[in-house]
Image (tube, rainbow, N blue to C red):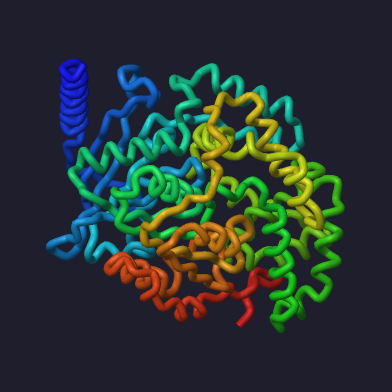
């Protein structure tokens, strides 16, 4: 029996060595260019199993870029950037190098990895059925998704967060890093938390901006959107220029939300025009003007604002990947009582969550254990950032996650929206935290300087 066990152990050891050498052979770095990055960087690729439960089966290729630190020698732990969405590609995050990561990069290499299903990493490209969604036509939306599924050269059931975390861990080993630090924005915070739960020894520290922990349902955000909307109305009323330009804004909002349609958007889709606009302070600053115009027969500003945001989303999101994650990790755990509670007292209702559940009814997704929705308990040092104006991942989400992160601190920027790592003093705070990995030593008082941008008034003129 001992001899048999030794033989088995030796076989497993040899298999591990063979797999490691294969992974290392596919991670040669070559000079390349990224969108929005002027300098030349390094790019590489790593083959990983599509089905993590079947390592010998079909393989997919993970693409990534490494941006070297500006100072030498670089810190031993690079910063792995975990993109949001779900569905965004990290290799499109070039603009953050000059904003959110400009200070961190002085000491650390930055790694941008297109998560499986996004960017160049076997993307699950499916067009979002915009017209069907706007008209509330569930059958047409489902038919569009079925048509896309028929042409996909991939199994969407294998494109969830746990599989992506296993990919990242393979990449860490292949690149020879003992540990790395993590930055996650929005859905990327969930990826970071799952990573810290499954591979705690691999993570030196993590920065979580706009936290979406596994034990919070991000599809149940109508209550948060309502709070952000009420804050917008109050801030406009307290602003001399905005209050003068739009003295009846609350009543005009009622008028808009009572419309049977606004352009191509029908019924329950009308309130959703406002939801996305509140993600960033810049877009939210246009909303009072757009609401006023729509209530007085000119829907173009509000429709234009929505189209701009939808266009950005369609350009940056891989919708099939979005579905593979949300249909595995969110939709199955949405119960009717929770949806009613979230919609109660909200102008946004439950249409948003219902829409995702309807789409997920036809999208193949992994069947995950409900235990994956439990809170992440971890000793990894963590800095949690939350925007007070955030309509989807407000400060209460960060505090919820922090309850079981034993070495963490929550910093709230009352005047910031969703994901603000590039604003104000946030880049400096991130770099300082990464340097000493001590959340208690970070003084976030400077975040109070981040303010809501001036409101846009009639004729597009901001207040002074």
Q: Quarter of the image containing the C terminus? A: bottom right
Q: Residue 15 versus residue 290: which sits nearer the camera?
A: 15
**Picture quarter containing residue 232?**
bottom right
How many numbered marks have been drawn onto this rendered protein structure?
A: 0
Q: Classify 16 as above or below 312.
A: above
Q: Position of residue 246 (x, y in %)?
A: 78, 73
Which residue does the image show at 34% across and 17% down from the upper left? Answer: 57
Q: Position of residue 256 (x, y in %)?
A: 82, 56
Instruction: Tell whether 143 sits left or right of 299.
Output: left
Which residue does the image show at 82% across and 43% down from the upper left? Answer: 267
Which residue does the image show at 49% across and 26% down from the upper left? Answer: 156
Q: Quarter of the image containing the N terminus? A: top left
Q: Residue 249 versus residue 437: which sits nearer the camera?
A: 437
Q: Classify 362 as above or below 418.
A: above
Q: Position of residue 72 (x, y in %)?
A: 13, 63
Instruction: Tell whether 288 sits left or right of 89.
Output: right
Q: Residue 34 versus residue 376: which sits nearer the camera?
A: 376
Which residue does the image show at 56% across and 64% down from the upper left? Answer: 417
Q: Position of residue 326 (x, y in %)?
A: 57, 38
- Is residue 188 shown to the viewer in this render? yes
Q: Residue 110 versus residue 432: which sits nearer the camera?
A: 432
Q: Residue furthest left?
A: 73
């Amino acid at each position: 029996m001992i001899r048999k066990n030794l033989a088995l152990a030796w076989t497993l050891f040899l298999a591990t060595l063979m797999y490691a050498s294969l992974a290392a052979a596919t991670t040669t770095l070559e000079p390349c260019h990224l969108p929005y990055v002027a300098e030349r960087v390094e790019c590489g690729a790593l083959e990983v199993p599509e089905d993590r439960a079947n390592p010998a089966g079909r393989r997919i290729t993970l693409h990534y870029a490494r941006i070297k630190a500006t100072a030498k020698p670089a810190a031993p732990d690079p910063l792995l950037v975990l993109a949001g969405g779900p569905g965004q590609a990290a290799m499109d995050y070039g603009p953050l190098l000059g904003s959110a990561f400009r200070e961190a990069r002085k000491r650390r290499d930055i790694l941008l990895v297109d998560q499986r299903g996004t960017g160049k990493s076997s993307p699950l490209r499916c067009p979002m059925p915009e017209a069907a969604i706007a008209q509330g036509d569930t059958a047409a939306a489902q038919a569009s998704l079925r048509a896309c599924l028929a042409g996909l050269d991939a199994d969407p059931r294998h494109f969830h967060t746990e599989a992506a975390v296993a990919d990242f861990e393979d990449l860490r080993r292949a690149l020879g890093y003992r540990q790395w630090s993590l930055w996650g924005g929005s859905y990327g915070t969930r990826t970071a938390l799952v990573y810290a739960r499954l591979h705690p020894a691999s993570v030196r520290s993590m920065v979580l901006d706009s936290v979406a922990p596994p034990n919070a349902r991000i599809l149940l955000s109508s209550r948060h959107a309502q709070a952000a909307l009420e804050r917008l109305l109050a801030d406009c009323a307290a602003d001399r220029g905005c209050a003068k330009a739009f003295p009846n804004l609350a009543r005009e909002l009622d008028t808009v939300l009572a419309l049977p349609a606004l352009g191509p958007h029908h019924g329950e889709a009308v309130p959703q025009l406002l939801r996305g606009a509140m993600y960033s302070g810049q877009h939210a600053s246009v909303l009072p003007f757009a609401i006023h115009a729509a209530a007085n027969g000119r829907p173009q500003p509000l429709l234009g604002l929505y189209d701009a945001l939808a266009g950005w989303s369609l350009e940056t999101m891989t919708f099939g990947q979005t579905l593979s994650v949300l249909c595995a990790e969110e939709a199955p755990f949405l119960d009717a009582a929770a949806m009613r509670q979230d919609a109660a007292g909200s102008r946004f209702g439950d249409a948003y969550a219902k829409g995702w559940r309807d789409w997920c009814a036809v999208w193949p997704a992994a069947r995950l254990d409900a235990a994956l929705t439990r809170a992440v308990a971890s000793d990894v040092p963590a800095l949690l950032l939350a925007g007070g104006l955030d309509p989807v991942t407000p400060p209460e989400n960060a505090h919820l996650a922090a309850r079981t992160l034993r070495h963490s601190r929550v910093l709230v920027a009352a005047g910031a929206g969703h994901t603000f790592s590039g604003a104000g003093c946030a880049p400096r705070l991130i770099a300082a935290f990464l340097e000493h990995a001590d959340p208690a030593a970070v003084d976030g008082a400077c975040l109070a300087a981040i303010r809501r941008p001036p409101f846009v008034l009639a004729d597009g003129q901001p207040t002074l």
